[in-house]
Image: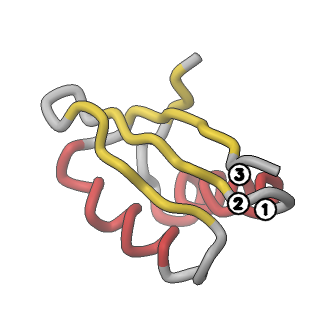
Amino acid sequence: MQSIRRSFVTERSKIGYIRFTIESYDGMALVTTIDPQKAIIELKISPGCEGMVLELMEALRRDEGLKIMEVT
């Protein structure tokens, strides 16, 4: 199985925090900055982890107040 790619736009100042948080869950996903000016990041999610990653992104929105929107 291949990793699942999902793109998000966020605040530029929060990219490092999101990367640190997501990647602290070892092997679940990797975060790549696609466009630092527009604050677009891509998550490469390990097979079987998509639900957990999306729940984590929602928790960052809800609990941390981060502005994170999925790019379609």
SS type, badge 2: loop
Numbered mark located on residue 54 in the image:
3
Question: Badge 1 is on which residue?
Answer: 49
Give the CA distance from mark 3 to mark 1.
Answer: 9 Å
Give the CA distance from mark 1 to mark 2.
Answer: 6 Å
Question: Badge 2 is on which residue?
Answer: 46
* Residue 1 in picture, x, y percent from top left: 82, 51
SS type, badge 3: helix
Label 3 or label 1, whichever lies nearer to me, is 1
Q: Nearer the viewer, residue 27 or 71?
A: 27
Rendering quarter of residue 37: top left
Q: Residue at x 32, y 67 (%)?
A: 17
Amino acid at dot 2 = Ser
Q: Residue at x 30, y 35 (%)?
A: 34
At label 1, counting other C-alpha atoms closer than 10 Å, the crowd grade (few under 14, some 14-19, many 20 or more) is some
SS type, badge 1: loop
Q: Nearer the viewer, residue 60 or 40?
A: 40
At label 2, counting other C-alpha atoms closer than 10 Å, the crowd grade (few under 14, some 14-19, many 20 or more) is some
Rendering quarter of residue 41: top left
In the rendered image, which quarter contains the C terminus? top right
Amino acid at dot 1 = Cys
* Residue 56 in picture, x, y percent from top left: 65, 63
* Residue 5 in picture, x, y percent from top left: 61, 39
Determine the residue located farthest toward the front in the rendered image: 1
**CB atoms at circles 1 and 2 under 8 Å apart?**
yes
Label 1 or label 2, whichever lies nearer to me, is 2
* Residue 15 in picture, x, y percent from top left: 29, 54
Q: Is residue 72 left or right of residue 35?
A: right
Q: Residue at x 52, y 48 (%)?
A: 43
Q: Is residue 67 left or right of residue 7?
A: left
Give the CA distance from mark 3 to mark 2.
Answer: 12 Å
Label 3 or label 2, whichever lies nearer to me, is 2
